[in-house]
Amino acid sequence: MTSNPKKHIIDAFLREIYGEKSAPDQTAEIRRRLLEKDQTLASDSKLGLGLGTDHLESDSVEPPVPLVSVKSEPVKVTSLNWVGVAAAILVGVGLVGAIIQIAQNRNPLVDQVAKEGGGEKDIAGLAAIEDADVEKKQKDKSGRPPAKGVDRSDLVKTDIGSIETGAKPKQPGRLQEQPGLTEPAKGIQAKRVFPERFAVGVAPTELGSILDQINSSLSENWRVNVIASRVPVEGSLWLERLFDCLLGRAPSDLDIARFSQDWESQEGRRRIVHQLVAYQDYSREFANHWADLFFLSLVSTHRVSLEEMGGSRGQPLRQFLRESFQKEKPWDQMVTELITAKGSMNPESALYKPEAEYIAIHGRNSTQLAAQFSRNFLGAEIQCAQCHDDSLYSLGRKDFFGLEAYLTGVKVSQKTGYAEVTESPIDRKNLGRFYFDEQKVSIYAPPTIAGRETPLDPADPRSDLALAIVQSDQFSMTMVNWVWREIYGYGLSRPGRVKASINAPHRPLLTHLAEQWSASQFDFRTMIEWVVLADAFSAPGAPSSDTLAKDIPKFGGVPFFSYSYDKTKHDVKSAIAKLVKAYQAPAGLTLVGRLQLSPGTSPAEEVDPLNAVDDNVLPIELEVPDFAKGWGVEAAMVAVLDQIALSAKLEFQTKLEHVFMLGLKRKPNGMERSQAQQLLSSAGTVDVESEKQVLQDIWWAIYPR
Amino acid sequence: MEKPSTSANTELDPLLLVDTFQTGIWRYLRAMGCESSLADDLVQDTFVTVLQKPFEHYSDAATASYLRKVALNLFISFKRREGRVVATENIEAISDAWQQWVKDDSGDDLFFTLNQCLEELTERARWALKMRFREKRSRLEIAQSLKITEHGAKNLMQRAKKQLRDCVESKSQPPDEKTTRN
């Protein structure tokens, strides 16, 4: 009897999922074997010719192998083909060529060379013809000549370049490292020079060395500020904290049993962290949790309506991020894909591109998009500089318009209910932007990213933008700071002003971590391990009396991480995690924001009543004021509950669905619906207030404690 | 024979071909019961064999199918050299199932679908599968760990795999149906 064939497929994939072995990248080995074979290939092999000048040359690993091993000679009549000559006399010169070719078993490309050049040509000649063909193809596709500048396919779209140079193979779409990238000398093309890549030449160091750096930097700050170090928390609490930070949940009994042997020793803790971020059963959970957090950071600070979401409601972007995190995509690659994406949000469309939703959400106009890019990837709140130079952040209007110059061709349109991101080439004479200063004088802002002038390819500006962003120091610092903030509640620097001098005590540490992360190829899991294995992560849960006056970031001071700010952070993070889960929700329910910690602003500014409540949008964006941070999950959830219950636009049964989704991640069944309706009827008058009272009663009945 | 499109024929890039299809071939061989180290070797052999001769790329699906065929032949040859019997009807059935399930060239879609489906299993079922596939624990050991009988452990894993199959089936709806639904 034959077993179910699909069982074999499931088993094979399960073995891979559970970490037995994944499909290896064997391109380099295949290439090496092909090179060996190629030296003996017949000259009529299409492969040999295809690889000869394009793909198999290598500067570092092996010498270039000329696949057409002899120089192409002009057609000559030799003693071997007298028959051909005789035939030529009879039927003409064209036929002679064919007969000679057959007689000599010639390579068709060699003949092409002879035809094009009419004389002797070598491999370089072949390459020149191929270059011309590539150029012709590009021209044919776009209807215009290829843009001047570097060949983008070398930078963004393929990893073949890495194979050519013998470098470590990279994933498709991965940016190549380009220290001081310059345009290869090609005719009259303008020279394009990108600023030097951040941390070029920095070698990645071992985990222990990085942890020493973090610990010594923090303890030095404690010493300077006379903050006594204290006994770290015990293992079980540490594990709880770790699960909360890395997976967004509490450890189960099974987890506790599994890790209880390891949690007391430093070495054991390293093993636990490694398992949570790298082992398949946890790593999927880890990836999804952090993808959701990053999703929220990408869509936050912007109240997204259903219309702006274009019918896709954030799902494509979230799915893209989850898959990117699960695939352990390096962050420079993931961010490049977000910045350069274009396509439709319609999953049925051939142009479907889930990552383009990030642009679709924020790309209503180029200034808004510039502000969002700067906020998310450069850690600089640059929008103020649209109207005035911002001396506090050392940002000028030139910075703003220099960044916006890359985005003027981006267009977000609506097609059949779904947003579509397109881009037209920049056709203005000056690639930068003009603006008026206070004296109404027109000022030219050249293309500028992270304070440095950078090249702009008018045919593909966003690829240049992405390259300059991910190669900048600000990108690496911003991302490290974001992760630190998600884990510790406060960043090493203030979000939105990562390079400014605020939080100066931590700047050397932030710079060091950013350099190391860049040197580690922007591997997210590596960075997470550094951050959670630092001693500060085991810090006690409450401040001591002497610490309280010196380490109180909630009142705007510099955080020294001498105790865990978890009453603030973990409660809100848990609330966020619950809300994100609720996001999967009843049809038509959309998450529009996130809970935000906003230290430094007054409660009056932070409490945002969320004015418009759309029928289909659950407005979860809550600014948690300082005085409310101790309220914890319950307070956050009640606030959300109020948003739902007090909405005048939602029907009672719809509100009930929201409440169930928040609490139980499912819709109410028929009996529950009818019981809720009875509760409402028994309340007497049916108005928004009584609905709120009933929903609150239900909430506390179903709330998972 | 249908004439291949010009673009498909002229833009063959051998290393891109390798990059695109190697994962799918490797996974296909693994589904056929090939050991992982042997699958590594056979993937290399497949591409070296195919690319030594003039090769025309008609479409991704056709190329993937052709590469799988070559890989399978190499696998069968290897088994025969070892003196092992190869049950061809089973191989054909697995090939058909592969064709039906793995819509893309690499198997990544199925990989992620399966990951999603795993999330829908109970924690006990996931734990059992993990012990089976990662830790290579015996059925008895799994049963002891979960405090159930050996038969219970067998049933648990069978049900889990059945649930996974059903889940994958439901999620791998053919694109034709999706488009006609509109």
Image: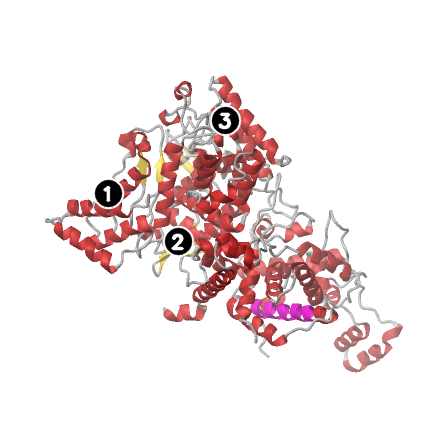
Q: Which of A651 and A73 is in front in this view?
A: A651
Q: Point out the residue furthest to the bottom here.
A: A90
Query: Vertical placement of A546 versus B131: above or below?
Result: above
Q: Which colour scheme is used?
A: secondary structure
Disc 3 residue type?
His
Query: Vertical placement of A231 versus A280: above or below?
Result: above
Q: Position of residue A553 (x, y in %)?
A: 39, 26
> Which residue lies under the disc numbered 1?
A642
**Stretch of the chain drawn in magenta:** B54-76
Image quadrant occupied by the N terminus of chain A: bottom right
Disc 1 residue type?
Asp
Tell if the residue under mark 3 belongs to the same chain as the one under mark 1: yes
Residue A287 in the figure: left or right of residue A115: left
Q: Residue at x 86, y 77 (%)?
A: A82
Q: Residues within 10 Å of mark 2 (few under 14, many from 20)?
A: some
Q: What number is the disc on residue A506?
A: 3
Q: Which chain carries label 3?
A: A
Q: Label 2, secondary structure: give it.
A: helix
Tell if the residue under mark 1 belongs to the same chain as the one under mark 2: yes
Tell me the mark number nearer the camera, choosing from 3 and 1. 1
Q: Compare marks 2 and 3 and give the one earlier in the sequence.
A: 2
**Residue A574 lies in magenta, yes or no?**
no
Q: Position of residue A348 (x, y in %)?
A: 41, 63
Q: Compare marks 3 and 1 and give the one earlier in the sequence.
A: 3
Q: Label 3, secondary structure: give it.
A: helix
**Residue B56 lies in magenta, yes or no?**
yes
